[in-house]
Image: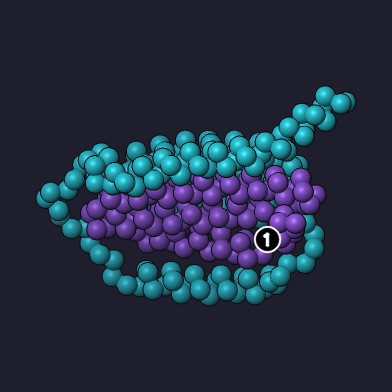
Amino acid sequence: MNTLVIIAIVSLIAIGFYCLIITRNILKIIVALQVLVKGAMIAMILAGKLTDQMELAQSMAITIIVADTIVAVIGLAMSIQLREKTGTCDIHSISKLKR
Amino acid sequence: MPLVYFLVVAALIYSAHKATRVKGLLNAALWLAGTSCLTSILVYILGSPGLAVIELSVGAGLVTVLFVFAISIIGDEKITSDVFVPHWLAISISVVSFGMLAYFLIAQHMPSAQSVTTSPIFSDLFWEGRKIDIYLQGALFISGILGILLLIAPAVSKRIKEGKNK
């Protein structure tokens, strides 16, 4: 069963990483980050279960969820600003925000 | 039990794949919500029901609502220009690197569960042992809320003005 969970962890991280490489839409990048972080969170829980430190793993996973949510919120707000300022959601146009 | 694990893991991988590859941002947000639900089920099966509830409420609830809110403001857009990294290279990098990671993780001997007699209670560890972390997380959350308000306010007020002019 641990092997199945490891397959899930590696698949989630690989899918998120692949999407992070190829996509240019800022909203899709946030989706990819969310998928990637879910893999990391499951890895944390599995590590806690295997070393019998479930409480520590849970508290660390809660920190991961909080940080991930803040990243998503800031990213979505930036995507709205990017769309308003440049008219596109292309990540390459994000440098135009400073002008 | 292994069948449940298999079904949840298979659905999780399929849902994550659809969330990143489906056309349309709203569909991607809904598939992401499904991924969060399945993640919380997997976390529950792994023996952490409290975290599963938090993941379900934050990952599938709050983040999905924020995604739909953002998509309703900026609309759906297809970017058709060339990507910096070609698809075949991205697939190769992902498959080789994470395939090797999976091989080494599965091939190695997994540590067996140790019996720790004095395991701290989760609430004690969370609220007492990691007190500074919790304060920092609270500050991070408040600063995030203030940040999104500052960033969204001009766009929302512009929309309201446009609506009044019409």
| Relative horizontal placement of residue B41, taking residue B151 as reference (left or right) | left
Q: What residue does disc 1 label?
A: A23
Q: Does residue B73 lie above or below B102 as drawn?
A: above
**Chain letter, colour cyan:** B
Residue closest to the eye, B154 or A91: B154
Q: Does residue A21 lie above or below B162 as drawn?
A: below
| Residue occupying the far right of the picture | B166
Is disc 1 placed on a helix, strand or loop? loop
**Which image quarter is the C terminus of chain B in?**
top right
Q: Would residue B30 be visible to someone looking at this image?
A: no
Residue B94: where, in percent of width, then height? 56, 70
Res B115 → quadrant: bottom left
Q: Which amino acid type is marked by label 1? A: Thr
Residue A29: where, in percent of width, then height? 63, 55
Q: Would residue A16 be visible to someone looking at this image?
A: yes
Q: Does residue B143 lie above or below A93 as drawn?
A: above
Residue closest to the eye, B134 or B67: B134
| Relative horizontal placement of residue B26, taking residue A39 as reference (left or right) | right
Disc 1 chain ID? A
Q: Residue at x 59, y 41 (%)?
A: B148
Q: Residue at x 43, y 69 (%)?
A: B102
Q: Colour of chain A?
A: purple
Q: Residue at x 28, y 47 (%)?
A: B130
Q: Residue at x 73, y 32 (%)?
A: B157
Residue B107: where, in percent of width, then height? 35, 73
Res B51 → quadrant: top left
Residue B53: where, in percent of width, then height? 40, 37
